[in-house]
Each structure stands twice: as structure tokens, then as C-alpha cells.
Amino acid sequence: MNDISPPDISPQHIRRAAQGDQAAFRLIVEHHSRAMFRLAFRLTQNEAQAEEVVQDTFMKVYRKLKDFKQDSSLRTWIHRITVNTAMDHLRRKRHLEVATETGELPEVAPEPAGLCAAEQQEIQERTQKLLQQLSPIERAALSLRHFEGHSIREIAHALELGESACKQAIFRAVKKLRLALEPWS
């Protein structure tokens, strides 16, 4: 489920990109865009919205790269910007009450053995519906932990939460997911 990502971009590339080197910045985008798209998609549940979030994220990264202090990895810093951008996007969407289409949800877990296709489809639909009902913080925390494999500390930093609040958000999201899927457990 989690991709093993290559090592982060070197500090020299980061410095060059911060100084305006387009090739160095392109390398950063190429290195991180797939992971940021997956994260944005999990948060927005919509492919077009995820693409917009990723584009906005890298525009912010380009503008703020000179302020990056390298006290965390570049990947963690970009994750934080992606999460914040997605949450801002979701708030705007709610505020404007724009109806949007829902994208297909990547599978949450391997399909349980012994379930028929109809049951597997129902589990997928319930999971997708539940993820849409989670708060943006719960959805982000769950996605970062279970889909991206981040530590509680990294998630708390990305979401600007305390570690206990982060754990609670993940716990609430998992509990809701388990309740929704209880008939199949």
C-alpha cells in the first residue's frame, strides 16, 4: 500500500531551486508530485480537485522555498503545505456549497477472502461514503497514517496539532470506519 520513496532531494538542489533554478525546482516537483496527488486525492475524494490542490501546493512551494529552514525533510514540509491547501480548498468548497463529483476511492485494504463481488463492492461504497463524512482533520490524519505511513509526530507537525489530538483524530476515523464495516468483520 505504501510506496517506498527514494531519498529526499539534496540540500544543494533545494538551495538552487530557492534561488530560482528552474531545473532544480522541476526535479522537486517530479520527485514529489505523485505522492502529493495521492494525498490530495484522499483528502478531496475528487481527481480534478486533487490536481488543483497539487498545482496550488507547488505554486506555494515555489514562492516559499527560500523560507524552508530544513529542520524537517522537504517531503514533510511539502506534505504539510498539501494538507493545508487541501483543507483550505475543502473549506472554500463547503462555504460556497459547490456540488462536485466524487472520484473513485483507491482500495483501503486487501479484499477479505470469501466475500462475493457484491459484498466487496458494498464495502468499497461504504468506505468511500464514510471517508467523505469524516472531518477534514480526521481524513487527513487517517490518510497520512494509514495510506502514507507517517509517524504520529510527522502527522501532528503536518496538521499543526498536538500529538494527542492527532492520535484522537486517527482513533475517531478508524472507529467510524470499523463501525461502518462491522457487518463484514
Image: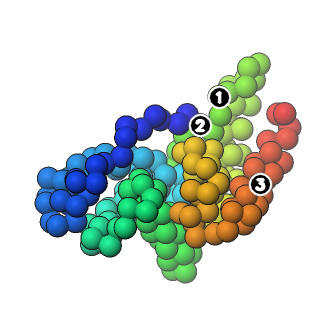
Can I make out residue 157 in this image? yes
Q: Nearer the viewer, mark 3 or mark 2?
A: 3
State the residue in front, 134 or 29. Answer: 29
Q: How is the image coloured?
A: rainbow
Instruction: Find residue 13 and report its horizontal and vertical position in percent.
Output: 22, 53
Instruction: Find residue 40 and report its horizontal and vertical position in percent.
Output: 47, 56
Q: Residue at x 63, y 39 (%)?
A: 108
Q: Residue at x 73, y 58 (%)?
A: 167
What number is the disc on residue 107?
A: 2
What number is the disc on residue 171?
A: 3
Task: Identify residue type, mark 1.
Answer: Pro
Task: Identify residue type, mark 3.
Answer: Phe
Q: CA distance from mark 3 to mark 2?
A: 20 Å
Can I make out residue 169 in this image? no
Q: Earlier in the sequence, mark 3 or mark 2?
A: 2
Q: Secondary structure at mark 1?
A: loop
Please state, as top left, top right, bottom left or bottom right, where the C terminus lies in the image.
Answer: top right
Picture layout, residue 132 above or below residue 107: below
Q: Residue furthest bottom?
A: 95
What number is the disc on residue 110?
A: 1
Q: Secondary structure at mark 3?
A: helix
State the residue in front, 39 or 8. Answer: 8
Q: Residue at x 54, y 40 (%)?
A: 106
State the residue in front, 99 or 130. Answer: 130
Q: CA distance from mark 3 to mark 1?
A: 21 Å
Residue 155 as seen in the image, left or right of residue 69: right
Q: Residues within 10 Å of mark 3 (few under 14, many from 20)?
A: some
Please state, as top left, top right, bottom left or bottom right, where the N terminus lies in the image.
Answer: top right
Q: Residues within 10 Å of mark 1 (few under 14, many from 20)?
A: few
Task: Identify residue type, mark 2.
Answer: Glu
CB atoms at circles 1 and 2 under 8 Å apart? yes
Residue 155 as seen in the image, left or right of residue 88: right
